[in-house]
Amino acid sequence: MLNRPGAVEGTGPDAGVAWHYGDPSGEQRALAARAAVADASHTGVVTVTGPDRLTWLHSITSQHLADLAPRTSTETLVLSPHGHVEHAAGVVDDGTTTWLLTSDAAALAGWLDSMRFMTRVEVADVTGQWAAVGEPVDAEGTGAEPVTWRDPWPRTLPGGTRYGPVDDRHPGAERPWRLVLVPRGDLDAAVTEREAAGWRLVGTWATEAARVAAWRPRAATDVDHRTIPHELDWLRTAVHMAKGCYRGQETIARVHNLGRPPRRLVMLHLDGSGHLLPEPGADVTAAGRTVGTVTSLARHHELGPVALAVVKRNVDPAAALLVACDGGDVAAAQEVVVPAEGVSVDRPAPRGPVARGLTPRTGP
């Protein structure tokens, strides 16, 4: 779609698709009105086939996938032995193939292939054959449609838990989103078909602004080598708390049971009175002390400049923050995503004092 009039290419993880087509605000309004289509062909696509595909993926990732019904969307994480996020993927199965949508298909496919051992599965990076079309539709794909992944965010899926607000009060509830997979050679035709129905082609400026406003984590931007899912409120959609063992499960259970993940996600409302805006990776400071890092940045058509940042858990939610920027720091106000208490809604109650004996002492 970079050959379309006005197209400006994105950078970083959005290189290869359009950042905008000349009217970022108008594109955001079309997306908010659910009359937009986006080129999401930079999304990586991995397929897993074979009779053991779902039980195998269930055993090595964070989500309950063993009995995933066809055309039912979910997402899963690959964690390190210490519980840090290594890969994230949207998951949908069509009855014969499990489709994984991810930011780094080659790396995920390589890791999965190394874990096959004696299982009856085949893994393939098919990004070169398949492209994703993004659309603001809150529905699973039907049997008459191509393979479609419906973003589950922010619904708390079965087996999940949350740190943030209830589902219907979460800002992400206002952001329907799904990715429709089409043969890469048919991408232009798929977009044109939607434009003929009155939808507007939009760039990643619009889609990223909607994602940031929805507090939706993205592995390509909001994850570093220390990230655990609790910090991003990602237990809602990507982790099943009652499934069997998998790599990293001990950290998931321990932090959930004890509370207090070391960091927490916030949305920052940045001072937009000047022309300065920080870059992803910019330091966040409070009272002269570095307390976090900006992970995603957007100019929202209604909220103005906003960002997602990961800060230390004990940072006062009311604290005045500054974000480092070339030319001068920018003031920022926090909107809490993961509460500073670091306690999920279903954390087990603390145990009471342990009795020293079954009966009270009556003698010396």
Image (spheres, rainbow, N blue to C red):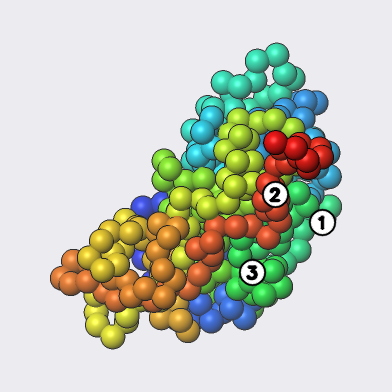
Compare residues 2 and 157 and report the one nearer the observer.
157
Tell me the tag on residue 142. Answer: 1
Q: Is residue 265 left or right of residue 7?
A: right
The Cα atoms of the two marked residues, 2 and 3, are separated by 28 Å
Q: Amino acid at mark 2?
A: Gly
Give the numbered dot on residue 315. none
**Image location of residue 264, percent across then percent down:** 48, 58
Q: Is residue 235 above or below residue 253?
A: below
**Considering only order in the chain, which callout, 3 or 2, is on the residue closer to the N terminus?**
3
Q: Earlier in the sequence, mark 3 or mark 1?
A: 1
> How many angstroms separate mark 1 from mark 2 (CA)?
51 Å
Residue wearing tag 3: 165
Q: Secondary structure at mark 2?
A: loop
Q: Secondary structure at mark 1?
A: loop
The residue lying at 45 percent from left, 58 percent from top is 313
Disc 2 crowd rating (10 Å Cα; few below 14, some 14-19, many 20+) is few
The amino acid pointed to by label 1 is Thr
Q: Quadrant of residue 121?
A: top right
Where residue 247 appears, x then y in whole percent?
60, 30
Dot 3: element: loop
Say if 57 sits above or below 178 in the image: above
Location of residue 83 (image quadrant) = top right
Inter-mark Cα distance, 3 to 1: 30 Å
